[in-house]
Amino acid sequence: MWPQLSRWKADNVADLKKGARITGATRDKLATDLKKKYEKGASIRSLAESTGRSYGFVHRVLSESGVTLRGRGGATRTKKK
């Protein structure tokens, strides 16, 4: 796990109750924090786990904040000859 994520979780999870709707300034701050961490290399899955939110929620917040999402990675399949 990313060391900075566990510290972030300890500082902020109390503010984010599981399943609670996140709007306004709270959502803006969360989006900014997630964007910074994602751009530093954290995965969407690790961000979702550290915040206690779903993959889809984190993906949507990142998309709304204008982040260019990375590809899935891994080896690509080549065509058999």
Image (spheres, rainbow, N blue to C red):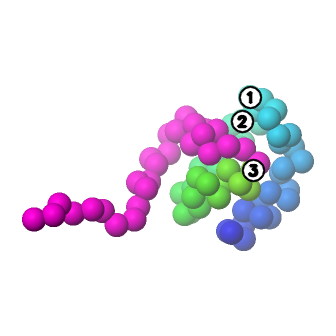
Q: Is residue 2 visible?
A: yes
Kindly report the distance in space between the C-alpha atoms of the residues bearing marks 3 and 1.
Answer: 17 Å
* Residue receiving disc 3: 51
Within 10 Å of the Cα at label 3, are there few (<14), some (14-19), or many (20+) other Cα atoms? Answer: many
- Please indicate whether residue 68 sits to the left or right of residue 6 in the image: left
Disc on res. 24 = 1
- SS assignment for the magenta stretch, majority: loop
Secondary structure of the residue carrying tag 3 is helix
Residue 33 is situated, as x and y percent measured from the top left of the image, at 68, 50
Dot 3 amino acid type: Thr
Give yes or no for residue 80 being in the magenta stretch.
yes
Percent position of residue 31, x then y: 65, 42
Q: Earlier in the sequence, mark 3 or mark 2?
A: 2
- On screen, residue 9 above or below 2: above
Residue 2 is situated, as x and y percent measured from the top left of the image, at 67, 68
Report how far apart the C-alphas of labels 1 and 2 lie in the structure. Answer: 5 Å
Check disc 1: other Cα within 10 Å, few if <14, some if 14-19, many if 20+.
few
- Answer above or below: position of 13 versus 21: below
Would residue 10 appear left or right of 28 to someone viewing this image? right
